[in-house]
Amino acid sequence: MSTIALTDSTILLATTDPIGTVARDETVSATLHLKSDSTKISEVITVNLILQDNGMSRQVATTGVTILPGDSQTVTLTFPAPSTIGSYTLTFSSPEYGGPLTSQTLHVAILQSNLQILIPAAIGVVAAIIVLGVYLIRGKPVKEAEEKTKTKPAAGSTKTRPAPANPPSKSLTRTRGTEE
């Protein structure tokens, strides 16, 4: 009696979507794309998402997935971002597959990256508007006040005009004349 053994190997090709910078305590979605190169074997695996920093690691999400021969599956795992700012390693792993599938870096900031750019820009615009407003408000009353004092005499004033600083002078001068 002869036995025919069928063999097939399976390699899972794993890729991730970039996450980018996230705010602390924000809900984060990490997406993993798996493609099987098998022609005969279906795989049923558990995908764990592990968050690592400074030697400490914790599992933040897990799910099961079935991958048919030659098929692709997309797995999205959601978890809260750490409350401490810094860089973390996200590792997708599978105990059935025998270890890590792929890793990527997660950057946690106080604010999202687009807000880190927009907030200072918005503050600059508001400051410019305030400066412009103060300039316009203070500029007009000073000019108007100067015009009013030039055109209107002060109330209750009996003086018509102040004497000019250098009035045309008529002076009587004596000259020593020569005798003729």
Image (tube, grey):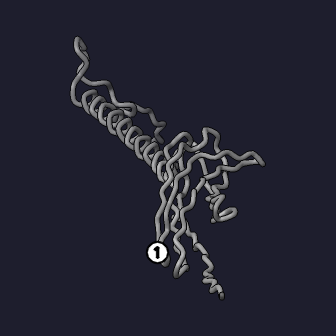
Percent x, y of residue 107: 61, 52
Task: Inspect the image, locate mark 1, and give the three-letter code of the amino acid beneath it.
Answer: Asp
The total number of labels drawn is 1
Tell me if residue 112 can be seen.
Answer: yes
Please state if 43 lies on the left or on the right of 121 as rendered.
Answer: right
Q: Position of residue 136 (x, y in %)?
A: 33, 39
The answer to which of 14 and 108 lies nearer the viewer is: 14
Secondary element at image label 1: loop
Residue 169 visible in the shown view: no
Q: Is residue 46 shown left or right of residue 170?
A: right
- Quarter holding the N terminus is bottom right
Picture quarter with the C terminus: top left
Q: Give the answer, above or below, for where 80 lies relative to 151.
A: below
Task: Classify 10 Å Cα crowding around label 1: few (below 14), some (14-19), many (20 and above).
Answer: some
Q: Nearer the viewer, residue 56 or 137?
A: 56
Q: Residue furthest front?
A: 1
Q: Residue at x 34, y 30 (%)?
A: 164
Instruction: Report the residue at 23% width, 11% height from top.
Output: 156
Closer-to-camera residue (70/121): 70
To which residue does mark 1 refer? 71
Residue at x-position 46% and y-position 36%: 175
Taking the view exactly as shown, the residue that stands out farthest to the right is 55
Residue 125 appears left or right of 34:
left
**Residue 133 at what x, y percent from top left?**
35, 38
Point out residue 80 in the picture as x, y percentages from the top left corner. Answer: 54, 42
